[in-house]
Amino acid sequence: MSDFDFSVITANWHFLAEGLRYTLQVTVTAMIGGIIIGTLLALMRLSSNKPLQWFAAGYVNFFRSVPLVQVILAVYLILPLLLQFLTGKMIPIGAENSAYFTFTIFEAAYYSEIMRSGIQSVPRGQIGAGYALGFTYGQTMRLVVLPQAFRNMLPVLLTQTIVLFQDVSLVYAIGATDFFGAADKITQRDLRPVEMYTTVAVVYFIICFALSRLVKRLQARIAIIR
Amino acid sequence: MNYHWDWQFFFQEADDGLKYYEWVISGLGWTTAVSLASLAVALLLGSVLGVMRTTPKRWLVAVGDTYVDLFRNIPLIVQLFLWFFVVPELVPDKIGIWMKQDLPYIVTAVVGLGLYTAARIAEQVKSGINALPRGQRFAGLALGFTEWQTYRYVRLPMAYRIVLPALTSESMNIFKNSAVTYAVGILELYFQYKQIIEKTSQVLEITIVVTLAYFMLAFVMNRMLAFVEKRTRVPGLISGTGGK
Amino acid sequence: MRKSLTALAVCLSAIGLAAPAHAELTGTLQKIKESGSITVGHRESSVPFSYLDADQKPVGYAMDLCAKVVDAVKSELKMPNLQVKYQAVTSQNRIPLMQNGTIDLECGSTTNSVARQQQVGFSVHYFITSVRMAVRKDSGIKDIGDLNGKPVATTTGTTSDALIKQNEKGKHIDVKNIYGKDHADSFLMVESGRAAAFVMDDILLAGLIANSKNPSDFAIVGPSLRDEPYGVMLRKDDAPFKALVDKTLIGLMKSGEAEKLYTKWFMNPIPPRNVNLNFPMSPALKAAFASPSDKGVE
């Protein structure tokens, strides 16, 4: 402990900050994309159309049964093969871009389950009320049901996003430079694991702890209004 | 697509004299071993922590809460690296050397994954106990039970049944999360997946096989716990009727 | 025979390349032309071939050689503004990434082996390494035989792990393999006392030792388990691109420029910490420069 060398951190903070920025970008992209796709999946799952139901259920169960780290690597290696098959050209994606895509489609499965229970939490009468006002299905969902579902599920959606923020660390498996990946790359070169990994743990803890406290507060507020 | 499909390679011999399909099977074995051992650690510790957080003793609650906050807010892979690379350097030299040389890696991995999951289990157990009416505890105390006995005979048997669905999904998560232990040198399924890709580059075949293997693990775990759930269902409770 | 065939192929392709206006571009060159960019795969801790400097930019001997190749591609395709992208690769993913088109050439420390040639192509060799082992000096380990019963670090996906068993002295000993995720990780295992030895290409070991906290604590010992040639990894069966890469590298070797680059990276202080590897050119490498070859090891 005595030779804990802070200079390793100060000398590399810029690189670490770059990594953190990438982690945040992936988190926000996957959150927005994941919630949109997830909501569509939830609507499919709750629709009366059997093939749509099956598709949504299959999608969700598929991604919920496989380890994220395996999906990250598999997509990275297979997506270009698929694109080549479709377009006939070799299209390099790169680890960084591949991760945006993987996290969006992977998290969609989890967000979809949250949105499904959110939609189910809205009383049936609300849908009837929407139709009674002359709304179409789309309008009822968009203007009546989804806003309430979203609002009820906001704390859960945000909690899932904190999990997602932590999970981005797994892109290290494909060599992308997220926050953890940046720390790992510095460790590879400078051989100072104690300093780097400890710093990473502390920073993750501070961010996630603060966010989860905020979510708790939000939850309390929403609970009162309801 | 000019991909060269080749399913035969699974039966070819690798450097170490084993065949590639044997690598997959051995990975499956390690995944199962790490997951089940971690699950045992997590259930035990998570239950203790969950109970602590519902007791009237302030300091027990504080310890439990701190643990959960700490272990839920650091990514699993970072926690594993802390156990593997950092902790042995912080403890006294003798213990550090022992941890590095004599302690099998699987122990470190199981401890890391187990402690991580325990925080999640503790949350479930706590919410299960809190879901019970307060009267259950009072009834127990009125019967002359000690605080501990009200847990043992009244509240925990109910609480576990209530949270069994949540525990089922945590148990399935642990199998998926065990893939991360490859990073600390456990030769589990994902490790073998990466290694087979390196040796053979038959990405599609091995991805299909390994994905199916994970499916199978999730399915078996799900069915086993569904069976437990069915057997322990509490009649009359809403949470006791959902079998899936 | 093989060498002269290669030389012949190079000459023939060079003639073909002299008139590119008429020839239809194929393979990697076509891909580069169409996308307007070339992606160079690099390593992160293969000192001094391909690793990250203080600004986390990939640098090294192999990177310098590849920069020359990229220049040649630019003038070949008449694309002075060709965009050059970099992609970090590991020993596990470099071959699939080459095959799926993520990277166009890999500049690191990849051994050209006959087995790998089933999947990818290689340029002529720019380095010859010997597989030996790094140990802590205070461990008293001097030879393969001393490893019996000890934990030995190996980096997964590299060619070294099977070599101990193949060595005469290693035949009857039993070692406990432990796996690092990268060379630096495996070395950390030796440094921290987790492993007794790290079996790897000697030059990589020298690089790791030079970069460690106390370089004098470590030694490279034992006989060479095998000599292995490094080449630039390319896509398989892409003769025009390979011809261009080979022509560039052979040109550098013949003009003495390759040797200058060697001196720059192996005999002088290098970033990020200005350590000097002091690793003189081996006779095997001198021979490889004199008569370039792309024949892989078995």
Image (cartoon, coloured by chain):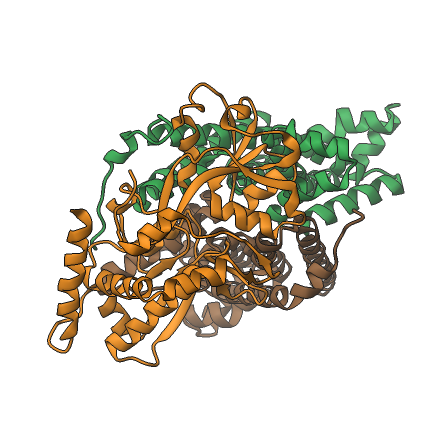
Chain colours: A brown, B green, C orange
Which residue reaches farthest left? C22
Looking at the image, residue C101 sits to the left or right of residue A70; the answer is left
Residue C101's place in the image compared with B236, above or below, is: below
Quick one: A191 or A42, which is closer to the camera? A191
Residue A77's place in the image compared with A139, above or below, is: above
Which residue reaches farthest top? C172
Taking the spot 38% from the left edge, 72% from the top edge, the residue there is C84
Rendered image quadrant of residue B230: top right
Q: Position of residue B179 (x, y in %)?
A: 51, 40
Looking at the image, residue B109 sits to the left or right of residue B152; the answer is left
Taking the spot 66% from the left edge, 51% from the top edge, the residue there is A192
Quick one: A155 or C118, which is closer to the camera? C118
Looking at the image, residue B51 sits to the left or right of residue C168; the answer is right
Residue A37's place in the image compared with B99, above or below, is: below
Rendered image quadrant of residue B232: top right
Number of numbered callouts drawn: 0
Q: Position of residue A106 (x, y in %)?
A: 46, 54
